[in-house]
Amino acid sequence: MGIIGWIIIGLIAGWLASMVMGRGGYGVVGDIIVGLVGALVGGFLVGLLMPGGFDIGTTGFWTSLLVAFIGAVVFIFLARTLTKGRTGL
């Protein structure tokens, strides 16, 4: 999957995850970053569960999107848990 495909999956997964988790999105760039990090987190988590491993780039658009979405939700949850109570500058 090319860089454009990763950006599209990252954008969609990050936007969906931020909407599901509440409090709105992080902007276009933030949603892409959350989605891409989520893809890495999701790929790692699914790879732990699958005996033969998991390659997010070869599984197709919908499977990659689902894994990236799940990873983005986990990533947002962890980020919000770790930064709970902190305020921005």
Image: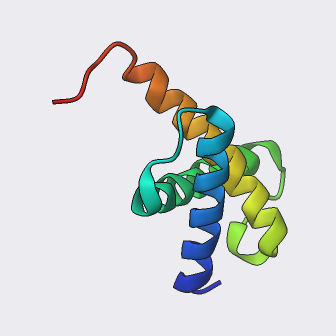
Quarter of the image holding residue 70?
A: top right
Is 14 left or right of 55, judged from the image as shown?
A: left
- Residue 43 appears in the figure: no
Quadrant where the C terminus is found in the figure: top left
The spot of residue 14 in percent (x, y) is: 58, 54
The spot of residue 73 in percent (x, y) is: 64, 39
Quadrant where the N terminus is found in the figure: bottom right
Note whether 73 is above or below 43 in the view shown: above
What residue sits 67% from the left and 51% below the top? 16
Q: Nearer the viewer, residue 89 or 76?
A: 89
Q: Nearer the viewer, residue 39 or 51?
A: 39
Q: Residue extending furthest front?
A: 24
The spot of residue 86 in percent (x, y) is: 29, 18
Quarter of the image holding residue 79?
A: top left
Note whether 20 is above or below 54 in the view shown: above
What residue sits 51% from the left and 47% below the top? 25
Colour setup of the view:
rainbow
Q: Nearer the viewer, residue 43 or 34?
A: 34
Note whether 26 is above or below 32 in the view shown: above
Q: Residue extending furthest top?
A: 85
Q: Residue extending furthest left?
A: 89
Is 74 left or right of 46, judged from the image as shown?
A: left
Note whether 8 is above or below 79 in the view shown: below
The spot of residue 31 in percent (x, y) is: 50, 56
The tally of labels here is 0
What residue sits 82% from the left and 58% below the top? 52
- Residue 84 appears in the figure: yes
What residue sits 74% from the left and 54% below the top? 67
